[in-house]
Image (tube, rainbow, N blue to C red):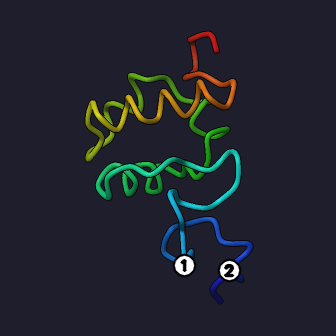
Amino acid sequence: LAPELGACRTAKFCEGRAGGVHNGAMDLPKIGKPAERALLNAGIYNLEELATKSKAEIAELHGMGPKAIGVLENALTDAGLAFAGETA
């Protein structure tokens, strides 16, 4: 059974995603599809989950490039968060 639209945890079930995987304050920012798939396949669905990983761990994901890392780092900073091992 697919989750209801408001309860979705992946982009596959989320329709009308204006600017990111979901639409709340801690949602992932808009990044390229390969990088987005890399995060989702790693079980990372929002900024709070992303902040539990180091920048090096994220950079190792297949499909993750330097541009996406920069966008993610800026989104974490804007949310008062940082990659694991770094200060916000």
Q: Residue at x 26, y 36 (%)?
A: 65
Q: In the rendered image, which residue does mark 2 sit on?
A: 5
Q: Is residue 4 left or right of residue 31?
A: right
The location of residue 23, given as percent across then percent down, is 64, 60
Please name whichever residue, 67 or 64, is drawn nearer the observer in this view of the structure. 67
Q: Is residue 62 above or below residue 58?
A: below
Q: Which amino acid does label 1 sit on?
A: Glu
Q: Is residue 75 left or right of residue 32?
A: right
The location of residue 57, given as percent across then percent down, is 41, 28
Q: Which residue is drawn at 33% across and 30% down?
A: 59
Label 2 with label 1: CB-CB less than 8 Å: yes
The location of residue 82, given as percent across then percent down, is 59, 22
Q: In the rendered image, which residue does mark 1 sit on?
A: 15
Q: Residues within 10 Å of mark 2 (few under 14, many from 20)?
A: few
Q: Residue at x 61, y 40 (%)?
A: 47
The image's mark for residue 75 is none
The location of residue 53, given as percent across then percent down, is 54, 29
Residue at disc 2, secondary structure? helix
Residue at disc 1, secondary structure? loop
| Separation of residues labelled 2 and 1 (CA atoms) | 7 Å
